[in-house]
Image: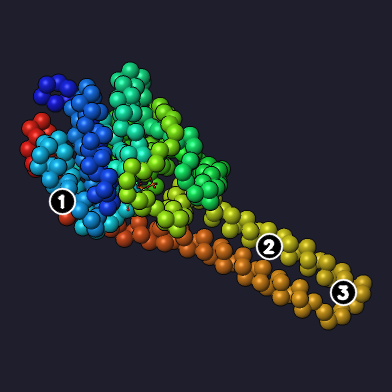
Amino acid sequence: MTNQEGRQTVTIIVPCYNEEQVLPLFLAAMAPVRQALEAECFLLFVDDGSKDHTLSLLRETAEKDDHVEYLSFSRNFGKEAAMLAGLTHAKGDYVVIMDADLQDPPEMILRMYDILQKEDVDCVATRRTDRKGEPPVRSFFARMFYRMINRISKTEIVDGARDFRMMSRRMVDAILQMGEYNRFSKGIFSWVGFRTHWLEYVNRQRAAGETKWSFWKLFLYSMDGITAFSTAPLALSSFLGVFCCIISMIYLVVVFVKALLFGDPVAGYPSLACIILFLGGVQLLCIGILGQYLSKTYLEVKDRPPFILAERCLREEKKGDVQ
Ligand code: UDP
Ligand code: MG
């Protein structure tokens, strides 16, 4: 899909949630990159139900610049939904996903495009080599999460991988075929396959504004990731069940032999209390695990749309008109 002059087109998707402070900086930083890029370049902002002036800023920008597009949600649906909306509406040969806060270095887009032209890959993705500037507790749990999920899931989830990447049209189409409601993009990118070239860079601080991710939100997101890409926790419940059965058999033999040899003195209240508590705990844990998968299945079955658009400004292919 090339444009009128035979140039290729690149669409850059930028999810934005309350980013009024950083948007002007972002646009300024992107200007030289858009000029230097050999391909025709569209910016597709996705306003994820921002409560500040992000949307009015986007409207103004789109009015002045016919290569700026935007979608706006009726409320906050989360970054995953914003990325999906962007991928659904992005046109062009290559699609980039990047954050608005300039933590993803814009100049890397040039390198990505270059690599996609020269090498036989469908995706150029980025990973951070360090987690500087992040609270240590968050880094610790993030590391634990990656170690665990890679052990229990068949899909490789790269530690430090960002959503910042450039993908070919066929890879984007493959991602769009995955119609799941509970989206965990880091897993989806890996699941669809295709050859990926990894670029590494040192972590950067946010240019302005604040992170939208609290520790709790990240924790829930990691749970989504585990349930979406592994069923190992369900196997763990079965394993715990078998384990408890074996232990109880052994204990039964011990009690029986003891009663035969030494009679049956009434004792064992503390041990009984411990056993009941332990088994109660194991049962609740297993029901909880089951509940996690059931709740995800429930949400999938309801088949709700992952996002609702309230407003959109998209350019028609080649003409630069508003659709
Ligand atoms: N974001 C979004 N919806 C949300 C939360 C975040 O679209 O509900 C966007 C946000 O505007 C930014 C990107 O996702 O462009 C990354 O968010 P942030 O910088 O807060 O995350 P961090 O870099 O701290 O992981
Ligand atoms: Mg950020």
Crowd class of label 3 (few under 14; some 14 to 19; many from 20; radius 10 Å):
few
Q: Write down the residue under mark 1.
A: 56
Determine whether the residue tagged by mark 2 lies in a helix, strand or loop: helix
Determine whether the residue tagged by mark 1 lies in a helix, strand or loop: helix
Residue 90, can we see it? no
Above or below for 269 versus 152: below
Give the CA distance from mark 3 to mark 2: 22 Å
Crowd class of label 2 (few under 14; some 14 to 19; many from 20; radius 10 Å):
some
Label located before the other in sequence (3 or 1)? 1
Q: Write down the residue under mark 3.
A: 259
Q: Position of residue 303 (x, y in %)?
A: 30, 57
Looking at the image, which residue is at 10% across and 39% down? 64
The amino acid sitting under disc 2 is Cys
Determine whether the residue tagged by mark 3 lies in a helix, strand or loop: helix
Tell which tag, 2 or 1, sits nearer the viewer. 1
- Please indicate whether residue 83 sits to the left or right of residue 224 in the image: left
Q: Position of residue 84 (x, y in %)?
A: 28, 45
Q: Write down the residue under mark 2.
A: 244
Label located before the other in sequence (3 or 2)? 2
